Amino acid sequence: MKTVDPTAFRPMNVTANRKTECGFELEPIIKKVTLDKMRLYRIGWPRVKGWHTDYEEAHKSGVDQPIVFASQVTEYIGELLIKFFGKGYLGGNLSVSYIRPMWPDDEIITKGIVREKIPEGDAIRLVLDVWCENQHGEKVIVGTASGLVS
Amino acid sequence: MVDQVRFTGTHDLLKAEIGHEIKPVEMVITEELVERNAWANDDYNPWYMEDSPFGGRIASPTLLATETDYMIWNHFVLPEGGGIWAKQEFEFINPLKVGKKVRITGQLVDKQSKKGRDHLVFEFLVVDEDNQEIVRMRSIHAFPLIARNEDRSNRGE
């Protein structure tokens, strides 16, 4: 029986380079965010029981279920950037707006597309549109990012 | 059984003035922290788990965003009605290396009222023990969770 190591690292097939053209679509990153993963994300920090990790606390706040941490899904975009730019993520930036809540067991697809190439000294800055969609095709996070190609 | 630690903030956020500094935090970027973050996010980049071109393991570039959330709520009291995290910005300057102690400083830099909510803007700077700037962050939080009706009606919303 063929098995897949869940902790295997999968690099992108195509990474940022000087020939990357505007309109290039980065290989998307697909994740399922579970309540276990949300709790694991939080438990590394001070142990706070709250509406991100607990149904009872979520109900007290007027929502049906815990809300996924915005910063946790932002990590998926960070993963996209470091996989695409490699060392060139340094000197880069990221700006995101959180436009819809995300819920346990949502499947989050993180995408990026090259929008602009800007010469910067000997390097090239690639500017991206980045966003995350849920399994319904709704955008939940939208933003821009950039990194350097030497 | 694990004790639940509640936030300890005491300052009134909505009355805070622009320039109000948040109590700084110092922390070590441990292997445990980086590995737990990898498990939580299913991101097992060898730069985090083994070694990197920067000499040693590094942490995810966005790792400390959630720490700024703790900083805010260990300094300010969460306003009645809760709030939402509306926006986050990062400027990646140097790698966040495992084993290094970092110091995070932050302050309130802007306040605006729009669409029935108070929008508060914070800026943070992470500097490591070698005095290298690692990442600058800017976050916008909006209060309350459910926008106020009166402001919406004023805008015809």
Image (tube, coloured by chain):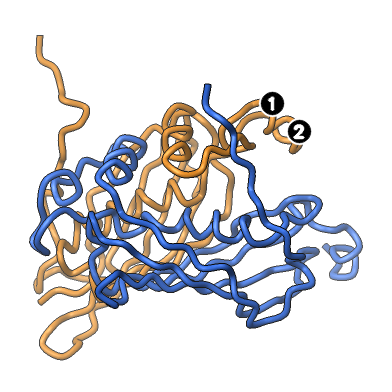
Q: Chain for mark 1?
A: A
- Which amino acid lies under the numbered mark 1 shown in the image of this protein? Glu
**Direction from residue B58 to residue B112 in the image, left or right:** right
Q: Which chain is blue?
A: B
Percent across and percent down for residue A59 are 73, 30
Q: Mark 2 lies on which chain?
A: A
User: Is A116 drawn above or below residue B9 in the view shown?
Assistant: below
Splitting the image into 4 quarters, where does residue A51 fall? top right
Q: Do the residues labelled 2 and 1 touch (CB within 8 Å)?
A: yes
Residue under numbered circle 2: A60
* Residue A83 position in % (x across, y down): 19, 54
Q: Residue at x 23, y 55 (%)?
A: B99
| Residue A100 to residue B153: above or below | above
Q: Give the residue pinned by disc 1.
A: A56
Q: How crowded is the residue under tag 1: few (<14 C-alpha within 10 Å), some, or many (20+)?
A: some
- In the shown orientation, is residue A115 left or right of residue A135? left
Which chain wears orange? A
Q: Distance between the residues labelled 2 and 1?
A: 6 Å
Kindly identify the amino acid type of the residue bearing the numbered disc 2. Answer: Lys
Q: Nearer the viewer, residue A80 or B62?
A: B62
* The disc label shown at residue B141, or none: none
Residue plotted at (44% across, 46% down): A72
In the image, is residue B82 above or below residue A49?
below
Residues A142 and B110: in front is B110
